[in-house]
Image: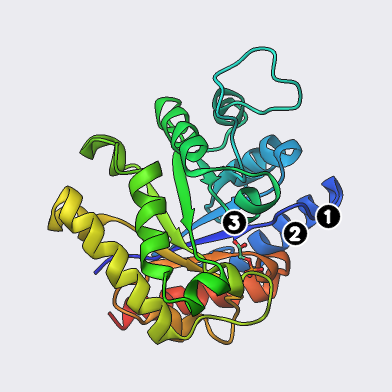
Amino acid sequence: MKNKIVIGNWKMNNSFTEAEELLTSIANIMEDMTLETEIVICPAFPYLEMAADLAEDNSFPYYIGAQNVSSEEKGAYTGEVSALMIKSSGADFCIIGHSERRMYFHETNVCLRKKTDIAIVNDLIPIFCVGEQLVEREAQNHFTVIENQLKESLFHLDRSGFERVILAYEPVWAIGTGITATPAQAQEMHAFIRSLVAEKYGTEQAYNTYILYGGSCNSKNALDLFLCKDIDGGLIGGASLTANEFIEIIRAAETSTKND
Ligand code: PGA
């Protein structure tokens, strides 16, 4: 039995106080619940330290992740946030390759490869996102797109590097649109991703690799997705901004693990 991972990607939302309140509400509701599921919260950079401090104080355990990391180690890169800064603020995870970064900030597979390397060197766990655009799926290119994203950004890693990485399949057409991939569509892609990992790193590593689904995942559809054989949890955007909704998704993850 493999436990699930549920990650909240808050994106560019919440004031400092709202972020604190949301974390406190989640912790208050979850208090005293024993969970198999690992939880990671990814707030904006300025809240990392506060979120990490609250995680230490709370009886409800969760990890902290950043939503991005610089591809440079340090130096004259105004506005950038380095892996060392993130790690020393108390975060252990870092989202890399989110489609919003690829689309609006022109991050390429090559740049994401650098970010992954720098995250690993600084002891951060990359949550590496892959996903196809709608036109690519309609043109039946979705498998090739995902394969290229993995090969160009991750498959240079040796096994000890790759085993640090969490993968997230996030079809771009499902992100923030309310259109979720069907469990069958998601499972098909997750199985494909796992087969690529098996080819490159062997079947044991493929089994151990976490492949999360993201894209309009919510309390209503989470269980059906999480019950799929190759879906190991979720990367949750909009639905992670409301305590009750996020907790219902965590509960779905728990139920799916028990039904494994
Ligand atoms: P969504 O976002 O759940 O709001 O679709 C997911 C993500 O972008 O990680």
Residue 73 pos. (x, y %): 54, 19
Residue 164, percent across and down? 34, 42
Q: Which mark is residue 99?
A: 3
Closer to the camera, 22 or 224? 224
Q: Is residue 45 left or right of residue 251?
A: right
Name the spot of residue 129 as percent of width and height, x first: 49, 55
Q: Which mark is residue 18?
A: 1
Q: Is there CB contact under 8 Å for labels 2 and 3?
A: no
> For the residue labelled by badge 2, is the local secondary structure a helix, a strand or a loop?
helix
Q: Earlier in the sequence, mark 2 or mark 3?
A: 2
Residue at mark 1 to residue at mark 2: CA–CA distance: 6 Å
Disc 1 vs disc 3: which is toward the camera? 3
Q: How many marks?
A: 3
Picture residue at 40% right of the left edge, 32% below the top = 120
> Does residue 166 appear in the picture of this structure?
yes
- Tag 2 residue: 22
Assess whether mark 2 and mark 1 are in contact (beta carbons under 8 angstroms). yes
Mark-to-mark CA distance, 2 and 3? 25 Å
Residue type at mark 2: give it.
Answer: Leu
Q: Are there few (<14), some (14-19), or many (20+) residues within 10 Å of tag 1?
A: few
Q: Residue furthest front?
A: 139
Residue at (58% x, 25% y) in the render = 88
